Amino acid sequence: MNNEKLSLDITFLFPNTMSTYGDSGNILALKKRCEWRGVEAFIHYSDIYDSIYSSDIYFWGGGQDIAQEIVSNNFSQQKIDFLNNEVEKSKVVLLICGSYQLMGKYYIDSNNKKITGIGILDVYTQSSPKRMIGNTVIEINTKIKLKIKKIIGFENHSGQTFLGKNIEPFGYVKLGFGNNGFDKTEGALFKNIIACYQHGPLLPKNPHLTDYIILKALENKYGLSVNLQELDDSLELKAFNTLLNRFKI
Ligand code: GLN
């Protein structure tokens, strides 16, 4: 199947209300790595008062406690049902930190207020007095077939997330805190949801993860005959390996 006939719709959820941690670069990375292969990428935006455009990929970033409370208080049952339905249709969802927490059952915030989550992910989060901030290296769960088995990132959260019985971690911490600083897990996997605490340029730093997301979305939309042509990632991988060496991982 040649790529110029392919396209992907990507919806960026709560881009204004939950935009504190510079996660919007992930949308650019997805768009460019599609277009460099002749795959058209249409970006849609959906904040609190907008409907959600049915897409192939959903991206939702992080936010402060107050932003999470606002989103939670304004999340309609219609939107919850819509997202549940999209997840059941194996649509790809990438969640970063605050949205990861809100996709779970609840988040007890830094004022000990219980913020109700959507409940799609079997996780819960409890704020901790100690913020978990710094560079990260994560060994990815082998359920995700990545060319490179590690990702590098940056975390900044007070929430400690604990996984339920019916959910797998996205990966395991080699550097940093991850979900909670205790059990060495990082993030969560459920159907085609990838949830993690990796802020800022997660996808620009990890082209192999970007391509995994694009491929899963194309396979889900067009079937398994899709092949993703290789790109020259020499510069990205030079940066990736420089950081890995700097972290001595
Ligand atoms: N407010 C949440 C916390 O502090 C999420 C932060 C974030 O999205 N970086 O854990």
Image (spheres, rainbow, N blue to C red):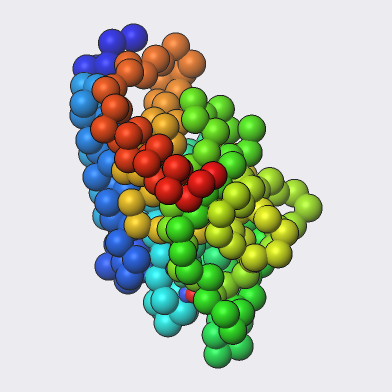
Determine the residue positioned at 44% across, 52% down: 153
Number of disc labels: 0
From this viewpoint, is residue 145 visible? yes
* Corner quadrant of residue 8: top left
Return the x and y of residue 135 as percentages of the image width and height: 45, 58
Quadrant containing the N terminus is top left
Determine the residue positioned at 21% across, 26% down: 36
Left or right for 35, reference 149:
left
- Tell which residue pokes out farthest to the bottom in this image: 111
Return the x and y of residue 130 as percentages of the image width and height: 57, 80
120 and 149: which is toward the camera: 149
**From the viewer's perspective, is residue 67 above or below residue 200?**
below
Quadrant containing the C terminus is top right
**From the viewer's perspective, is residue 68 above or below residue 137?**
below
Determine the residue positioned at 35% across, 57% down: 200
Return the x and y of residue 136 as percentages of the image width and height: 50, 54
Return the x and y of residue 161 as percentages of the image width and height: 63, 65
